[in-house]
Image (tube, grey):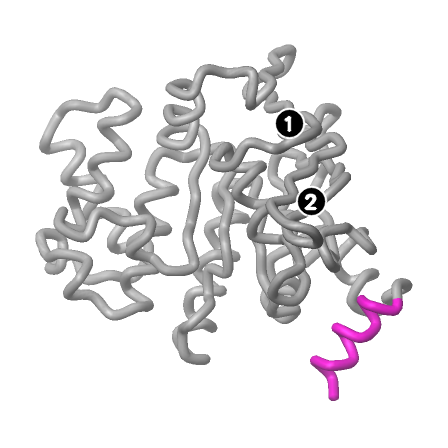
Amino acid sequence: MTSAPLSAAPLLTVDNLTHLYAPGKGFSNVSFDIYPGEVLGIVGESGSGKTTLLKSISARLAPQQGQILYRPQPGQQQDLYAMAESDRRRLLRTDWGVVHQHPLDGLRPQVSAGGNIGERLMAIGQRHYGDIRQQAKQWLEDVEIPVSRLDDLPTTFSGGMQQRLQIARNLVTHPKLVFMDEPTGGLDVSVQARLLDLLRNLVVEMQLAAVIVTHDLGVARLLAHRLLVMKEGEVVESGLTDRVLDDPHHPYTQLLVSSVLS
């Protein structure tokens, strides 16, 4: 993916972040910035610490060391873990979104598809039932789910449809930043391809900032402007996606790339 235009100030700053829950488990001394409209990919093998890092930067796991600064507007700055817990929860319902690998983790299984989308709209203050229902219909169309399924439960959907519904639920509020954990994991190849096309188009159209954790370097190349490569809880290489994948410097990155090509 080509480089995203960088604004003067980052949207999110991660400074010297550490969370180790066992020796060699978690992550340590991680620092980076995320800019508006930029997609940052975090790649590495299972156990590299990338999912734990994602939980920490998305306000779901307090770090043991370091700081996360969020800048919702020019001139504003919030220390994520100095905020009240209620304010962090509200942030996740409004300005931010989280797309889980297993979509039912990010959906209300016993609430209709339309209700899942509508709940996010109500979280930002919308109350008109007709308007909420109309927006839910539009988002189902946008993520290629038949509008006739509006009142169906997510548990009646296929895995690919559940993931598209989860994406609609997260993006309906036009968040500034979205965190995605293996968004195409567990889906067959044809469903993955459609979902990746959808994500790429939405990121560009909505000028989303996003952090995507994946073990799939093909997904990273398609979606991410920049990459962090993690090994045993540390960032061993970072840079523009094409540079990291086409000219990897660290032996571990070279191994990852060669294992995909071989």
> Which x, y percent locates residue 255?
80, 75
Q: Which mark is residue 111?
A: none
The kind of secondary structure the magenta stretch mainly shows is helix
Name the secondary structure under disc 2. Answer: loop
Which residue shows up at 24% across the image and 61% down it? 145
Q: Which mark is residue 68?
A: 1
> Which x, y percent locates residue 141?
26, 55
Give the Cα separation between the discs numbered 1 and 2.
Answer: 22 Å
For residue 73, side relative to residue 27 (left or right): left
In front: 137, or 255? 255
| Observer able to see residue 19 | yes
Which residue shows up at 57% across the image and 48% down it? 52
Which residue shows up at 90% across the image and 63% down it? 249
- Identify residue type, mark 2: Ala
The magenta-colored residue range is 251-262
Quadrant of the rendered image containing residue 14? top right
